[in-house]
Amino acid sequence: MFARVFRVKVPPEAVEKGPAMAQEQAVPALRQLRGFHAAYWLHDAQAGEGLSVVLWDDEQAARDAEEQMGPKREEMQRQLGVTPQDMREYQVVAHS
């Protein structure tokens, strides 16, 4: 399994809109992609940061998805007013 982790700065006004946007737009789009396993959106109100963790069956599925979902993710971030900080990729070495 492979994970792609995005860190963003989240303004207070995005906190209310973010979960609905994830459920209504991101989840259906991700579910249609080959190799999608799961996605988690995390928020730290004190730090004003958020993490998105998206799990894929393998590295190639993650790379293919980025080509398809990258522009959609950027548009959603723009609509919410979040500021991308970084993106990292990880091989999942264990899970339960």
Image (cartoon, rainbow, N blue to C red):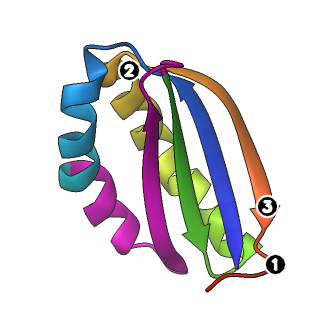
CB atoms of marks 1 and 2 within 8 Å: no
- Spatial CA distance of label 3 from label 2 is 25 Å
> For the magenta stretch, what is the residue range?
25-48
**Nearer the camera: disc 3 or disc 2:** 3
Which residue position holds label 1? Answer: 93
Q: Is residue 42 left or right of residue 57?
A: left
Give me the residue at 67% from left, 82% from top.
95
Q: Residue at x 43, y 48 (%)?
A: 41
Q: Earlier in the sequence, mark 3 or mark 2?
A: 2
Image coords of residue 30 (percent x, y)? 39, 64
The image quarter containing residue 28 is bottom left
Badge 2 crowding class, 10 Å Cα cut-off, few under 14, some 14 to 19, many 20 or more, is: few
Q: Residue at x 35, y 33 (%)?
A: 76
Identify the mark at residue 78; answer none if there is no mark: 2
> Is residue 39 a member of the stretch shown in magenta?
yes
Q: Where 29 falls versus 83 (above or below)?
A: below
- Residue identified by numbered label 3: 90
In the drawing, what numbered circle is on residue 24?
A: none
